[in-house]
Amino acid sequence: MSAFDFTQWPPLISDKDREILQFRATSYALAHGLLYLPPGAQPSAPTSAIHAPISLFPTPFPRDLFKQAQKLQSIYNILYSRIAMDTEFLDQTMGTEVGVGQVDEFTGKLWSGWLDLREKGLVQPLHLGLFRSDYLLHQRDSDLSLKQVEFNTISSSFGALSQKTAEMHRSLETSTNVYHASANLTASKFPSNHSTSDLVKGLAAAHLAYNVDGSRILFVVQAGERNVFDQLWLEYELLEKHSIHVVRRTFDELAHQANISHTDSVLRIELPDQSAVEISTVYYRSGYTPDDFPTNTQYETRFNLERSKAIKCPTIPLQLAGGKKVQQVLTEPGVLERFLCDEAKYGPQRVFSVQTLAEIRESWMEMWALDLNGEFGVRQARKRASDLVLKPQREGGGNNVYKEAIPGFLDSLSVRERPAWIAMELISPPVGLKNYLVRAGSGASVETEVVSELGIFGWSLFGGGKVISEREAGWLVRTKGKDSNEGGVATGFSVLDSLVLV
Ligand code: ADP
Ligand code: MG
Ligand code: MG
């Protein structure tokens, strides 16, 4: 295990060097498309952009644990693909009859819509997943390990901007002398990151599987999205490297512009000149939160796209598989075995060893359902509150309840609502680690104690009981001030960062 002293990071530098780094970093970001749209309403053709929030130094991470996270990704790709194909499991866990869908309206609506479509008959057996498995370092005494925060199956963002951030840190290493302050800050210790091209290979694999000349990929996006450049880099890569065109639409636009053929379920999107293009793959960068469904119309649009012949990234079952509830149920005895050790179902070549299952479990914190054994789940949550986070079935940050807020929250939670929540032991990242964080328009960088979350991207194309192809697809680091519980970059709590392996 690495004996790296996190309290000594970053190296001491002068105020002058700090200014040089900031100038170089923000200039690089602006010049290379490491950008956001500015806050506030924007014209339909944007005229300005701001640099994304960034750190001035990459964050040290033990090399063996980084390799471990990369190695686990293939197994997670297969695991979540199989969960999405296990209708019985999803009905039990997320459905409205016995699962979370009974009490969580959003989950219930998605599941019910899917059930309805299943009964009518779905025509596209393939699913595409672009995944991100998120981790924090966990420190116990001098022992460091890798612990999973969550597994995302929908709208995982920052694939493109994380690659740009890693490239920015590389550039700071070569273009200034400031990184000479630490022997660790050498390019050979910066792991490569090709998340843009790697993730796009997943989208291209689905497009190729659909196999219709002239078809396009549909990006379903949010109106007013500020993180557009992260999405646009994927579009440019699709067009330039794979000759695949992209159409971007919101749910509201699709309500009028999406047409599904009655005869063969082909999805076509109306273009401004009133011609129509066939869609091979629907990639959602929207639809992960109930806020994206203010009325029934957006649900109807989602279900319409779901029933079309286009390949969905993700399908509803794959979105449901990414629920926090599923993450918790996986920790119950025998559940991982159901997905990874069933030779009769998956074939003797496609099951995993006891050792592999142990490694996966080693990456988990303790989790339980709040409705576990009558009052027991809640009683445990009260007793261990200072060491816990409670999570509902939501994505996108800002939904969890932490530590001292837990008892009061439990007082306000009705017995009926409990099954929608899980309790998770808090991960304890190394303390004393610092960085300089820079946000556009806020002047000097902020020196602060930080926590860094590593995300490993992956993709999987699967269906008909089988994983057709899957890959690990690069990585992401988001760094937040230590005192902020949540880590969403888009919500303003954290910055994009990269790694130095120690
Ligand atoms: P979301 O899907 O909304 O991103 P997460 O499960 O990732 O939900 O939780 C949001 C943030 O809360 C994480 O990025 C992390 O900063 C923090 N967090 C979540 N679970 C834990 C945990 N077990 N220990 C410490 N921090 C956590
Ligand atoms: Mg998260
Ligand atoms: Mg999430």
Image (cartoon, grey):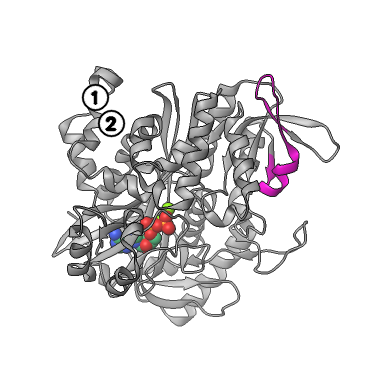
Check residue 249 for magenta coloring: yes
Identify the residue at image location x=78%, y=56%.
45
Q: Which residue is mark 1?
A: 342
Q: Is residue 499 visible?
A: no
- Dot 1 falls on a residue whose secondary structure is loop
The residues colored magenta run: 247-268
Check residue 252 for magenta coloring: yes
Measured as percent of width and height from the top left, residue 281 is found at 60, 32
| On screen, residue 2 above or below 386 | above
Q: Amino acid at mark 1?
A: Asp
Measured as percent of width and height from the top left, residue 133 is found at 37, 47
Quarter of the picture containing the C terminus is bottom left
| On screen, residue 18 above or below 364 | below
Dots 1 and 2: beta carbons under 8 Å? yes
Identify the residue at image location x=23%, y=62%.
378
Q: Quadrant of residue 70?
A: top left
Measured as percent of width and height from the top left, residue 75 is found at 31, 35
Going by the image, does 418 lie left or right of 250? left
Q: Which disc is residue 339 wearing?
A: 2
- Residue lying at the far left of the rendered structure: 141
